[in-house]
Image: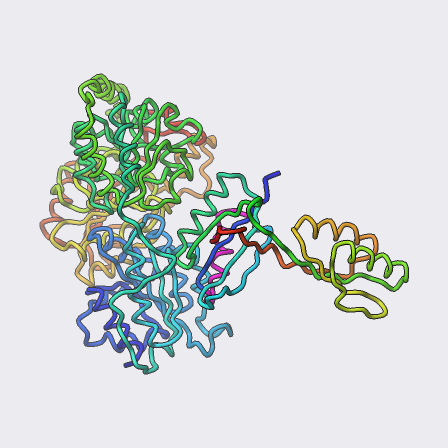
Amino acid sequence: MSGSKAFVEGLKRENVDIMFGVTGGALLPICDELWGSDLRFVMARHEQGAAHMADGYARALGKVGVCLATSGPGATNLVTGIATANIDSAPVVAFTGQVPLSVVGTDAFQEVDIIGITASATKYNIQVRSPSEIPPAIKSAFHIAFTGRQGAVLVDLPKDCQINVEDIEFPDEVSFRGYNVNMTPDTREMDWAATLLSKARRPVIMAGGGVISSNASPEVIKIADMLMAPVVTSLMGKGSVPSDHPLFAGLCGMHGTGEANMLVSDADVLLVVGARFSDRTTARLEDFSRGAKVIHIDIDRSEVDKNVETVTRVIGDAKLALQGIIERLGKLSYEPRANGDWVKKMKMFKDQYSPHELSDNPHIRAPAVMRALRKALPRDALVTTEVGQCQMWAALYFDAYAPRTFFTSGGLGTMGWGFPAAIGAKAARPDVPVVDIAGDGSFGMTENSLATAVEEDLPVIVVVLNNRMLGMVAQWQRLFYGRRYMAVKLGEYPDFVKLADAYGAVGVRPETIGEFEKAVQTAIDDNLTTVIDVPIDPEENVFPMVPPGKGLRDILVEA
Amino acid sequence: MLPLNTIAFLVENKAGVLFKVSNMFRRRGFNIESISVGAVEDPQVARMTVSVYADSRELNQIVLQLEKMVDVIKVKRLDPMRSIMREMVLIKLDTVDPMAREETLKHVNAYHGLILHIDPESIIAEITGEPKTIDEFISKTRPIGIEELSRTGVTALEKGYLKL
């Protein structure tokens, strides 16, 4: 069997039915094998888009997403997408073509050392050295990407390994001496955590992306109810607890809500589930939750005590850990009602820090757009975001009601991620509307994915909060650099309505919130790729905000 | 100054693993003082010994980040009291002057070293010992005139029943 035949067969054995990619010279043998197979190949127009599509697909379904690129520039173009998926722990397997082994190392045409380049941007990477290594490489890639702390794996496929014929076996499983994922938490660790929680008077739960990847939302809600503990989320944890849950206090961090940041600062026990204390979540580390005993549940042991010192930790699958703690809490005597004052305090913070909204401004306000969008969409609609002001407005003002409905590039902060990721999410969930909440700067970075959305019939809605600015950088320049707007003004072009039209998509420019709602409704009803270009005030800031170098308590609700 | 620590670990003995390990140190900002690598009794496995300046928190992170790597099988930080640590240096000294030659032989003897090669202009000697012994030897022979030297980096085993 040829290597490329083994490749296609190997993917089928991993239940792959779709991949996102851009082909090229070093992929010709594989493409020829895909011809006539029932694997769907979604053609991206740029490899970065292909990787983001696979990422969006993976996050929406909780299944490995697959992307494919040719050697050299095809491979390097994938890198941003791979790094984005990996740092957000999204299971993505990337395949790259490579020049034949006989010329590897000679700086051949379209040769690049993608193994070296992606070594620190992947969970693991492998270069195949013969056709018979292809099936075990695929098996390993899917196993490593999907187990433990999920992440991105790259497999590099030299062209001769695709062409050559060898006796090929397909292993049912692979094992690594150095990679054993222990999902089951230690019982003593869970005892400790339960005891600490039972004694807490001001408990707070912080839910991170790990809650979503381990499908632990019901357990987080259950433990919050048992303890009467407010729940805050990291950016990656958004959606893990419904925004309308009475104990939900919103996002914590640099652009967190006032109540979330104050609760975390005042807590006596902080239960952190599947979050990694990114600097954007903790703000000034020395001030972070100083009075609290921190309990950290994580599948990745190296995250514990990396940034924040913990009192106790539970290493393992978040769902299993929470189930164990819930069971133990049930047997302990404790008085959650005593936490009633604490919940009252949460409500007080909520009133105190409710964001100010300017009513006399003639412009459409971004928070209002977020609320109108929420109103127009069904509860199970999927939303991706770009990065910058649009992302923070979405995080703060767009309510998410369920896990795997809100997706964002949290770790890498990749502008241009949201739109292709939305296309991938649409491929995963064609049954629900998918919306990318974008800014004009971000959308410009991957707008060529419009061709894929239209040609591949993966209709998504792009809401462009258009301030003709790289808005977040402009906000910092406005607040901390004396309004010296350097390299942030994007000018008058492109005209996004015409751009949409050029790609065969629908473009609209609403002038009021009413027109915006109508545009969203039409886009959902017609199920067509639609760019909704919403002009907003270039001077509008995202608040609340913790200024750089300050602690969570130093939150500003206005300039 | 941060203390010098020694970490020993087993890895898959295959192409690219040394790169991935050293790349992890670089990317996380840990500075390798020395590294030595070689296959063990099982040819599929190689043992690496790294010495690194780090405080206890960093050291903990290094161990955890190594353990997380797919190609790393087992990691241990070595307690210097319970381990034997050795390093070797090959050193070529300028011995044109007969006095220098005499000095060289004296020092090599004092450090229980070996003379590996003698020619009219120079002597190559081998010294084995703990890293600080090697440091000492180098500083004592510096006045003689060092043509060149090459150190292997530390390698280590734990004493008694302790093993990696």
- Which residue reaches farthest left? A525
State the residue at coordinates (22%, 27%).
A229
Compared with A33, A91 (above or below) is: above
Residue A36 within the segment the image draws in magenta = no
Q: Nearer the viewer, residue B50 or A358?
A: B50
Q: Is residue A414 left or right of residue B53?
A: left
Is A381 rendered above or below residue A144?
Answer: above
Front one among A324 and A462: A324
Asked whether the viewer can see residue A151, the reply is yes
Residue at 90% from the left image edge and 62% from the top image edge: B98
Residue A32, x across and y down, in percent: 27, 78
Residue A4: percent from left, percent from top: 29, 76
Tell me if B124 is positioned left or right of A551 in this view: right
The residue at 11%/42% (across/down) is A378
- Part of the protein shown in magenta: B13-31
What is the quadrant of residue B117 in the picture?
Answer: bottom right
Kindly tell me whether residue A390 is visible in this rendering. Answer: no
Give the image quarter of residue A78: bottom left
On the image, the x and y values in percent for residue A127 come to: 40, 68
Q: Nearer the viewer, residue A438 or A411?
A: A411
Task: Tell me, yes or no, whether the highlighted magenta stretch contains residue B26.
Answer: yes
Which residue sits at x=11%, y=44%?
A: A521
Q: Is residue B126 above or below residue A234?
A: below
